[in-house]
């Protein structure tokens, strides 16, 4: 058990007494579930593609230490440091996202991944939380200084990011980013009529994607008409939940992961359902929902507009991404290749989620009290 005296003024002690430990341990809970699922889901995937049985598990465990370090380092930042960090992160991520169009690996008709020092990375995952913080920064600055064109700058950055996502293409990321960005504008006081207009424009863009992007057409057609196309993965996913029942078949005893190509990533929730059952699935959903709701309630207690807008954006991002992954596995929405934060296998996803968690903890941390003055 970690223990620090309140009079201890060391850097780590100050962090411990200011960090929101409810959120911290909630994030650690998700990371722990992620380790469990990597152990359960990845050996079969590795065997199927001819790799050493624990290849993916070892790689997942390798990312745990840098992920925890990332959460700690980012959570120690003050608001001004967070703004600078997000700006640098966004610029680098946008540059690398651009490079994926020329040097990226094409997977399922999209170029989203690029190899950096031997590690496959999805740069757009890092631009996502950075944009949420920068948008909050720009909007809050315009509230302070009405002549400052914060909304315009935020819009330009948003359009730049979305334009690159269209070229990849990554419709799911576009919808997620757009929803978060519009949500932040709305919380800031964006007129409802404008929000509705932009929402309609977004639906129009989705219709265009349906007609002009073949992989989007296939996914929507399969969702709307069960007799169209190949339903192999989603059928296996639903079968996994049916097999698991209320209490699951037991850790490592599931069979669907032998047949699901993305059992360790996009469909990890299906593996969780089969091996651990309905109640554990509900627990994971409740834990994620708790993080989002509790985090927003904490943020709304703050008086600083930047803190409120950034927290709302990051928490909405985390919650919506989890919803898309879980809903896809349950066929509540068309399937979309989006990871379940901290639980799905993937280095980019893990580090990006850790950055998001660190940012949230940095924003809602408590103010440090000088206890010597109160003695």
Image (tube, rainbow, N blue to C red):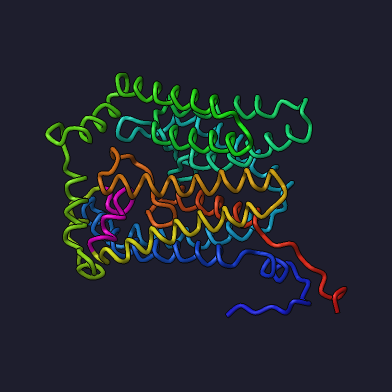
Q: Is residue 54 left or right of residue 221?
A: right
Q: Quadrant of the N terminus?
A: bottom right
Residue 301, horizontal then vertical, whole percent: 66, 55
Number of residue marks = 0
Q: Position of residue 111 (x, y in %)?
A: 39, 31
Residue furthest to the left = 227
Residue in view at x 66 percent, y 44 percent: 85
The residue drawn where x is 32% and y is 65% is 280
Q: Position of residue 222 (x, y in %)?
A: 20, 34
In the image, the segment drawn in magenta is 262-274
Residue 163 appearing in the image = no
Looking at the image, residue 40 sits to the left or right of residue 181; the answer is left
Q: Nearer the viewer, residue 232 or 68?
A: 232
| Place of residue 297 in the rendered image (x, y in percent of width and height, measured from the top left) | 58, 55
Left or right: where does residue 32 sit relative to residue 77? left
Relative to 150, does residue 299 appear above or below in the rendering?
below
């Amino acid at each position: 058990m970690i223990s620090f005296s309140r009079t201890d003024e060391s850097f780590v002690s100050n962090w411990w007494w200011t960090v929101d430990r409810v959120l911290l341990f909630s994030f650690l809970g998700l990371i722990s579930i992620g380790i469990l699922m990597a152990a359960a889901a990845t050996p079969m995937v590795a065997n199927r593609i001819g790799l050493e049985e624990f290849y993916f598990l070892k790689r997942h465990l390798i990312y745990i230490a840098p992920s925890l370090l990332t959460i700690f380092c980012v959570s120690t930042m003050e608001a001004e440091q967070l703004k600078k960090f997000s700006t640098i992160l966004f610029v680098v991520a946008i540059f690398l996202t651009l490079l994926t169009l020329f040097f990226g690996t094409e997977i399922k008709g999209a170029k989203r991944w690029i190899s950096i020092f031997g590690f496959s990375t999805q740069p757009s995952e890092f631009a996502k939380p950075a944009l949420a913080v920068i948008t909050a920064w720009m909007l809050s600055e315009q509230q302070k200084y009405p002549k400052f064109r914060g909304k315009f700058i935020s819009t330009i950055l948003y359009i730049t990011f979305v334009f690159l996502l269209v070229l990849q293409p990554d419709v799911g990321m576009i919808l997620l980013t757009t929803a978060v960005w519009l949500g932040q504008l709305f919380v800031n006081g964006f007129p409802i009529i404008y929000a509705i207009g932009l929402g309609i424009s977004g639906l129009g863009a989705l219709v265009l994607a349906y007609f002009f992007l073949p992989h989007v057409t296939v996914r929507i057609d399969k969702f709307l008409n069960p007799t169209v196309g190949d339903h192999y993965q989603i059928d296996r996913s639903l079968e996994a939940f049916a097999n698991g029942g209320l209490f699951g078949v037991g850790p490592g005893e599931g069979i669907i992961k032998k047949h699901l190509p993305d059992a360790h990533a996009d469909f990890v929730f299906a593996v969780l359902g089969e091996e651990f059952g309905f109640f554990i699935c509900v627990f994971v959903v409740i834990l994620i929902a708790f993080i989002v709701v509790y985090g927003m309630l904490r943020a709304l207690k703050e008086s600083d507009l930047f803190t409120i807008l950034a927290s709302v954006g990051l928490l909405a991002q985390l919650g919506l991404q989890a919803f898309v992954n879980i809903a896809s596995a349950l066929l509540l929405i068309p399937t979309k290749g989006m990871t379940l934060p901290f639980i799905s296998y993937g280095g980019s996803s893990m580090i990006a989620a850790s950055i998001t968690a660190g940012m949230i903890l940095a924003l809602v941390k408590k103010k440090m009290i000088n206890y010597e003055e109160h003695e």
